Every structure is written in C-alpha cells, then in structure tokens.
Image: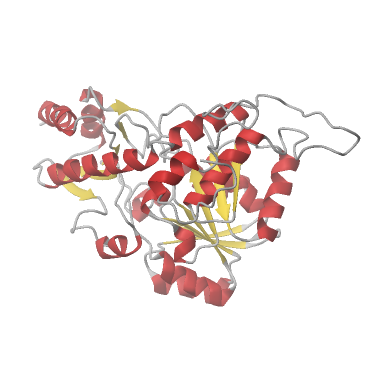
Amino acid sequence: MKKGMKTDDLHLATKVIHVGGYPDPETGSVIPPIYQTSTFIQSSPGKHQGYEYSRSHNPTRTRLEENLASLEKAKYALVTASGMSATMLLMHTLPVGSTILCGDDVYGGTYRLFTTIFKDIHHFKFVDTTDLKAVEKILLEDHPKMIWLESPTNPLLKITDIAAISKLAKKSKAKVVVDNTFLSPIFQTPLELGADVVLHSMSKYINGHSDVVAGALMLNSKSLYDKLWYLQNSIGPSQSPFDSWLVLRGLKTLHIRMKAHEENAKVVAAYLEKHPQVEKVSYPGLKSHPQHKIAKKQQSGYGGMITFFLKGNIGKSKKFLSKVKLWALAESLGGVESLIEHPAIMTHASVPKKVREEIGLYDNLIRLSVGIENVDDLISDLDQAFKAVR
C-alpha cells in the first residue's frame, strides 16, 4: 500500500496488514524498519523532521498508532509500555478527587491500581454495569467523571450494553472508557457504540504471540489526546520501537487469529456445557449466557475466552489444573497457544476473597484462553484432566 492512500473503506482484514505498513521510502523495504534509536538529528536548534526523542515520538510507534486508530475507527491512538500504564495515564487526566464508576468485575490489576495507588486521589464506585438502573443511580447521585467498562468482563464474561451506558453517560457528561482487550477491534468497536476511549492490553490478542507487554488508547477527542500525550511524554511509559514492531507484525494475522480463536472456543464451550463435572459455563456465544442477546447485538463475534465452574472445592480445581498437559497453566491470554488459569489464586489474587465471592468469582472458577491449535486435541486434554479428578 502506498503512503497516503485512503483506508476508510478498506475491510478490517486488509487494514491489519496495510495501514501503517507502507514500504520504507528510503529503501523500498516491504516490511517497515525498526527505528531503534533514542534520538534524532536536528538541522538547527528545534528544527527536526517530526521526531526528536523516542520517548516522545518514534516512526515505528507512529506506524503502529496509525494502524490501531484505523481498526478502532478512531482519529487518534497512543501506544504505551503496558495496559496498566495506559490505565494510569487516563487516571491522571482527571481532576484530583474525581469519582469513577467502575464495573465490579474487572481485571485484578485494574482493581489493584484503583484501590491502592489511586485510592487517595480519586473515589471509585464499583457496580455491576449490566444493571442499567444501578449505573443510572450512581450517575445521578455521585456525578462520576468517568465510567470504566470491561465488556466482556474479566473473568466472569458479563456483557454490558455499551450503547445504553454511553447514552446515560452523555446526559451526565461522564467519559466512557471501554477495555476492549477480550474482543479486539475485529469483534467490537466501542467508539461506534458511543464510548469516548477504547483501551487495550496489546499483550493479549492484538499482538497475539505472548512475547510483548504493551498497551494502547484510541479516541476521537483531540484535547484529551493532547493531554494523554503530554502525560506520557512527561511520565515516560512509552512503547519501545522493537516492541512496537513486534505488535505491528502480530497485527497482520489478527483477523484470521480471532476467527480461529472463536471457532475453537465455540466447540470447547459446548463440550464443557454438557460435561457432568462442570457446574456452569460462561461464554457469550452460548444461548445460556444471560447477556447473549446484547453480545449478539453489539459484537460481530464472541471471542476466545471461556470461564467455567468445576464441581468441587479449590483442592479439586488445583488438581484439575495440575493434570492438563497441552493447556499451559499461565496468566495472561490471547496468544496463539491455549492457556488455563485459576483467577482466585492467579490473575485476581489482589481482589479480596469477600469481594470476589460477592460478585460470583468463586474458588472453583477456571478461566480458559482458547488458542488456535486443533480443537480435538484441546478437548482430549481437558477430557483426561476431568477423568483424573473424577
């Protein structure tokens, strides 16, 4: 694709490969180079070619930001060193003492950041965001500056009606941030549903190969983008050129990877739902999911994440997890390989047990990130683990 070509009308499968991926003008290299430099020469003091220092800007990172903005149908994108640093930057855009309405089921790292690092800076109201009346009540009584959503949530996979929440937020002049990590822009574009900012932990599906830690913010407000860029440049959590290049490479297969993740997840979810040793399965693609209709309305796919409750106590869950062979027992998600984990002990250990159980995150909950291996092999491995703990 030639630089400057209009990309608005291109399909997502084409955008992931070509936007920001134009050949190097210097050499004609089809694959963009890594600008592994800390600084850039200036022709005279203050006169440069758009780049002066890699904490502020870097050509490799610029290409990635162009790609991401096009996928989420945003005007601006900002790439950060991690998903948590992207979250931190957003918190710093708010006046001290602001109230933030946050979903009660969110990533453990997000919960930890809000309830420890920012607990004396802002006020956080945690609520089930699938309950529109509860959200509206907090909007009317507490006047939050921001609404923090995950949809699907991590790890219970609850689905929030993003358009309905955004409509309520606009009346109250609250900014809506949606963590879109679990679905990627292939399956959901929250800005089109009325959200103000989309956040991604690019360590997951966006990169897709479990070899990068990265975050990103996509938005349409220039004033908010300028504030975020100023904060990033001042505090310093910028993405490295090499990691930006790796994510650009991973993005090229995002479209086909997401389809493969979903195809496998549907089969695994159906298998688990019928299994006698499984108490309950949560997967938005199942008709049994409480918000299946909302998911079908606002998403173009259901993703590769599944959670299920194993019949038995925490001891049985630990034994089950120790018996899997093909599934990797590890934190994170969204890589080509299948991962399995125990949220109460691993990703959500920072959430107090009482709080976990209040929202339904019990000790027999197991989270799956379904990879793109042969699905028969994945089910065979789960089957032998079930037999081992029968």
- Which residue occupies the extreme top position in the image? 325
Image position of 358 with respect to 319: above or below: below
Of 308 and 33, the residue lying toward us: 33
Colouring of the image: secondary structure
Of 147 and 189, the residue lying toward us: 189
Q: Position of residue 205 (x, y in %)?
A: 40, 39
Q: Residue at x 52, y 44 (%)?
A: 67
Residue 85, by quadrant, is top right
Q: Is residue 115 visible?
A: no
Q: Position of residue 63 (x, y in %)?
A: 58, 39
Q: Is residue 381 visible?
A: yes
Q: Residue at x 63, y 32 (%)?
A: 25
Residue 40, by quadrant, is top right
Q: Is residue 233 left or right of residue 238?
A: right
Image position of 128 with respect to 65: above or below: below
- Which residue occupies the extreme right position in the image? 45
Q: Is residue 380 left or right of residue 174?
A: left
Of 300 and 66, the residue lying toward us: 66
Image position of 88 with respect to 143: above or below: above
Q: Is residue 144 left or right of residue 194?
A: right
